[in-house]
Amino acid sequence: MVLRNRPRLALASVLTAPLAWLLVIYIGSLTLLVVSAFFRLDSFTGKSTSQWTLSNITEVTTKGAYIKLVLKSVGVATAATLICLTAAIPTAFYVSKCAAPWAKRGLIVAMLLPLWAGYLVKAYALRAVFDPGSAFGSGGFLSSTFGWSPGFGYVAVTLTLAYLWFPYMLLPVYAGFERLPDSLLDASSDLGAGAGRTFGSVVMPLLVPSIAAGSIFTFSLSLGDYISVKVVGGTSQMIGNIIERALLAPNQPLAAAFTLWPISIMVLYLLVMGRLGAFKNL
Amino acid sequence: MKRMSKLFAFGTVGVFLLASCGGSDSSGGKALDSLGDGEGQVNLIAWAGYVEDGSTDPAVDWVTDFETETGCTVNVKIGNTSDEMVELMQSGEYDGVSASGDATLRLIAGGDVAPVNTDLIPNYANVFDDLKNKQWNSKDGVAYGVPHGRGANVLVYNTEAGPAPDSLSAMFSADSPYAGKISVYDSPIYIADAAVYLMATQPELGITNPYSLDQTQFDAAIALLNDQKSRVTQYWSLYTDQQASLESGAVTAGTSWQVIVNLATANGAKIGAVKTKEGATGWSDTWMISSKAKNPNCMYMWMDHIISPKANAAVAEWFGEAPSNSESCGLTADPNHCTTYHADETDYWADVWYWTTPTSECLDGRDESCVPYSEWVNAWNELRA
C-alpha cells in the first residue's frame, strides 16, 4: 500500500536487483577482465601486480603465431557457420513448407532432440568417427568403413562444431520460414518466377535476419570453443586453448589480453549482424 | 546510447574501486605449534596416482585406512600440470598440494603455502637425508613441506615399432623411427627436456643446467622444439589422453611417467620405458600445506600418513617412483622396488634434473642473466599457437 502512492519507489524496488546484476556481475566482471589485461605479472609468483603495462597487449597483437591462430579460429568458426547454414535452409524449408501437418510436430521434436545429449558425449562420439587409426589399432567409423578419414585436425574440428551447433542455426531459420507467408511463394510463381528466382528474390531477403540470428549462435559458440578441439583436434589449437593455457600458467593478465581478440571480433560481428536485422526477430 | 555509456562509466568506476582494494599479501603464515583434533576432512590437490582410495584398483588404497584412523575424509582434485596446481592453490580453497619443484618455489614466494613444523610429523625423521631441506622444498633452512618421493621422466616406446631406444634422439632427431607418432608433455617445463638433449648433442652451447638457460641456449632449445613439432602427434596434459594413445598405438614414443606406463601395460599396451642415456628431467615432489588451510590438523595428519613407511611404499610402487621414507623399502610388494627405482643410489640421480622454476638469476651460479619462467610460458604458448 505504501508503494501505490510512491511510483518511483515501486519502480526502484523492481529494477534495483536486475540492474545491480547487469552492472556488477555482468558489465563489472567484463570490465574487470579487460582492465586486468593491463596489469603487469609478477613473473615469479604468477600473480598480477598493480603496475600498469601495455606489454600483454603488444604480445598478443604483434606475434605472428598468435595472429595466425586468431585467423585460423575465425576460419573454423566461419566454415562451421556456413556448413550449418547450408544444411539448415533445405531442412527448415522442408519442415516448414512441405511436411504434412502430422509429421511436422515429430520433425520439430527431432530438431530439438540433439540438444538433450551432452556436449562431451557428442564430441567423443565424433572422435570415434574421425579416429584415423594406426598400424597397431583399427581406426574409427570413417576409416574402417571407407578407408579414409580426415584424421584429427582442423577439418574434424570444423565438422564437429557444425554438428554440435546445428540446432542453434536450424531453429531460427525454421522460425523465419514459419513467418514467411505461403501466399508470397504462390504470388512469385504466378508472376512467372522459377524456383531459383523465388528463392533468391523472395525467400532469401526475408530470411536474412533469421540467418543472421542463427549465425550469431554458431559463430560465437565455435569461436570460443576449446573443448572439442582437444577431443578431435589432434595437435591443433583455437584461441580458447591459448587463453586457457595462459590462465593456467598462471598469467591472468596475458589471458585477459588474449580474450580481447574474441571480444572485439564478436563486437564487430554483432554490429554487422545488427545491420542485417538479426535483433529484430529475437 | 547515451544512457548506456553512462552505465558503462559507472561500471568502470566501480571496478577501479574494487581493483584498488585488492592488495597482495605475500606473507606465508606461521607453522602450526601443536596438533589439535581433526576437522573431519581435508582437501588436496595431487598428481594422478598420489591419492588412491581403491576406486582405480581395489588393491591400491592408502586413503581408506587414513580416513578410518583419523576421521578425516579425503577430497582430492587431480592437477595435470604444475602450472595448474599453482593456479588452484592460489584460490585458497585447498588445504594442501603435492607440488613438484617447478611449483614449490612459486608457491613459497607467493605466500600460498606455510612453513611446516616437522616436529609434528613423526615419520619425517626417516626421510632420506638427501631429500630434506633442499632448494625446492625449503627457504632459509625452514622446511615448507615433506618430501613425497622422486622419479625420472621416462621415454616410453612401443615395443613392436622397432628396437628399444635408449636415447632422447627418438624424441628430437629428424630421422627418428617414431616420427609422426610422438607424444610430448604439454607444459613449458618440457623446454628443459630439449635442453637436456642439447647438453649432450651440442656441448658448444655450454648448457650445465637445463633450467638455467641464457637467451642463446634458450633460443636453441625453442628451435629444436619447433623442429620437433612436425613429428609430434600429441601434446598431452591429461595423463589419460597419453594412456589411451599408447594403448591404441596412435603414439609409439613419448615423454611419460612410469605410472602411465604401468596403467597402459595393465590394459595390454605393448610398451617399454627407459631413462635415456642423455639423462632426464624428473621430479622430487613435496607435500605442502596451504597458508589459508581450513583443515590444518587433518593436513598435518595426511602429511605424516603419506610419508609413513607403509603408505609411502604403496604410493611409490603404484606411481613408479622412489619412496622418500628409508623404511618404505622393506614394505614394498616387490622386494626389489627400491633397487629398481634406485631409491638410495646417489649416482643414479646425478643426471636426473629435478623440475625447478627457472629464474632470471641463473641457477647454475654464473654471473649472467637467464630466461625466467614467465618467458618459458610465453615461448611455449607461441610454440603451441
Image (tube, coloured by chain):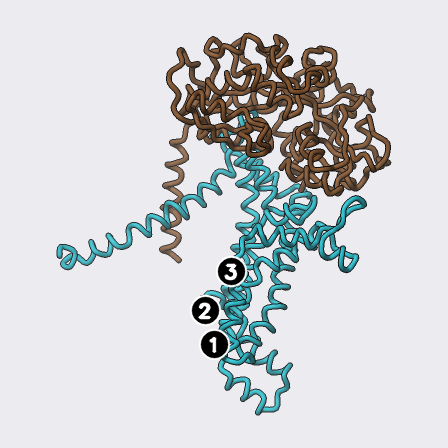
Chain colours: A cyan, B brown
Q: CA distance from mark 2 to mark 1?
A: 10 Å
| Residue depicted at 62% across the width and 27% down the height | B373
Q: Secondary structure at mark 3?
A: helix
Q: Quadrant of the N terminus of chain A?
A: bottom left
Question: Is residue B31 or residue A210 the one in the foreground?
Answer: B31
A14 sits left or right of B374 in the view: left
Residue A281, label in figure: 2
Q: CA distance from mark 3 to mark 2?
A: 15 Å
Circle 2 marks a residue in which chain? Answer: A
Q: CA distance from mark 1 to mark 3?
A: 24 Å
Residue A213 is situated, as x and y percent measured from the top left of the image, at: 51, 64
Q: Is residue B273 visible?
A: yes
For the residue marked with disc 3, what is the amino acid?
Leu
Residue annotated with mark 3: A271
Residue A179, label in figure: 1
Question: Is residue B229 or residue B338 the one in the foreground?
Answer: B338
Local crowd size for mark 2, using a 10 Å CA cut-off: few (<14), some (14–19), many (≥20): few
Q: Are marks 3 and 2 in contact (CB under 8 Å)?
A: no
Q: Do the residues at discs 2 and 1 belong to one chain?
A: yes
Local crowd size for mark 3, using a 10 Å CA cut-off: few (<14), some (14–19), many (≥20): few
For the residue marked with disc 1, what is the amino acid?
Arg
Residue A150 is situated, as x and y percent measured from the top left of the image, at: 74, 55
Circle 3 marks a residue in which chain? Answer: A
Q: Are marks 2 and 1 in contact (CB under 8 Å)?
A: yes
Q: Quadrant of the C terminus of chain A?
A: bottom left
Q: Earlier in the sequence, mark 3 or mark 2?
A: 3
Residue A68, label in figure: none
Foreground: disc 3 or disc 2 = 2
| Residue depicted at 56% across the width and 50% down the height | A262
Foreground: disc 1 or disc 3 = 1
Circle 1 marks a residue in which chain? Answer: A
